[in-house]
Image (tube, helix red, strand yellow):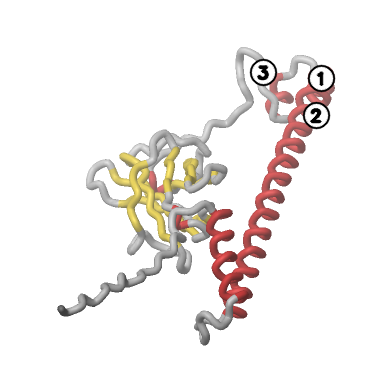
Amino acid sequence: MQRRKKLVKKLILTVSLLHLSELKLRQKIWSIIKAAIANPTLVTGLNPTTTAMNTKATTLDSLYATRDSLRQQQKTNTEQIIETQNDLVNSITSLWMPQVQQAIASDATKAKTLGYGIKSEDTGHTDNVVGKAADSHPMVNHIDINMHLQQTLHIINSISGHVKLPADAKQIDIYEQLDGTAPTTIKGMQYLGIAKKGKFINHFDSTDLGKTVHYIVVYIDKKNLKPLEISPVVSTVVN
């Protein structure tokens, strides 16, 4: 009677490094590297070497630490901006304005010369009117990066400082490029969509973590739907 050969199931390795949080990914990478270092005879001649991989993982930890420090610096800077801005507003409103009020009496011309408004008559603001797109351009004024794998673009007009479109613009189109040299045109960039009321929310995959994203936003012509004016490029990092 012929003996049957015992089938040996082929061993296929897996390594689940995708779709992990930053912390879990770093922990998994370190566990694999440390296991290789602790068991050098199980697999010899690894390329890259365990030393090289250990150095890279250490560099990654350092980069994360630098990013955390920069975030804290940005937070501190923003707090200082708000504090200083509020101090200036309060000083003009509560300290200067009463002194000016007393010094100029009821002279409206002096009030306007000094940049103040007159209650029920003049706010003191100068309105910037947006004409055609050729007279200005769209501008990414701020990118909110506080949400994980999400960025919110806040877009304004370069002349008015407001979200209102120029008379000949239909919409604002959004383009991005991940990594690489910062682009100067939208050619080759990925089209994302249309901004609504000066805002656009961009979502990322976990595989995009740590990549640099470059944005250009564009005014689109009402008549021919072609680009009118493009913004300067702005760049940030996906977190």
What distance separates the C-alpha of mark 1 from that of mark 3?
13 Å
Q: Which residue is mark 1?
A: 98
Query: Could you classify mark 1 by the number of other residues whose Cα lies within 10 Å: few (under 14), some (14-19), or many (20 or more)?
Result: few
> Distance of mark 1 from mark 2, alpha carbons?
10 Å
Q: As shown in the figure, which amino acid type bears the numbered disc 3?
A: Ile
Task: Name the residue: 53% across, 31% down.
Answer: 127
Disc 3 crowd, CA 10 A, few/some/many (<14, 14-19, 20+): few
The first of marks 3 and 2 along the sequence is 2
Q: Secondary structure at mark 3?
A: loop
In this picture, residue 217 sits left or right of residue 97: left
| Residue 142 visible at all | no
Q: Look at 33% across and 63% down and name the residue there.
A: 187
Secondary element at image label 1: helix
Mark 2, residue position: 91
Residue type, label 1: Pro
Q: Compare residues 104 and 22 and report the one nearer the observer.
A: 22
Question: Which quarter of the rendering shows the N terminus?
Answer: bottom left
Q: Quadrant of residue 93?
A: top right
- Determine whether the residue tagged by mark 2 lies in a helix, strand or loop: helix
Name the residue tied to disc 3: 118
**In-image side of 70 versus 152 (left or right):** right
**Rendered location of residue 85, percent (x, y):** 73, 36
Foreground pick, 214 / 2: 2
Compared to 110, does 235 lie above or below?
Answer: below
Q: Which residue is located at x 81 percent, y 26 percent?
A: 96
For this rendering, which residue is in front, 236 or 194?
236
Q: Position of residue 109 (x, y in %)?
A: 70, 23
Mark 2: which amino acid?
A: Ser
The residue mark sitting in front, 1 or 3, is 1
Q: How far apart are labels 3 and 2 at the CA level?
A: 19 Å
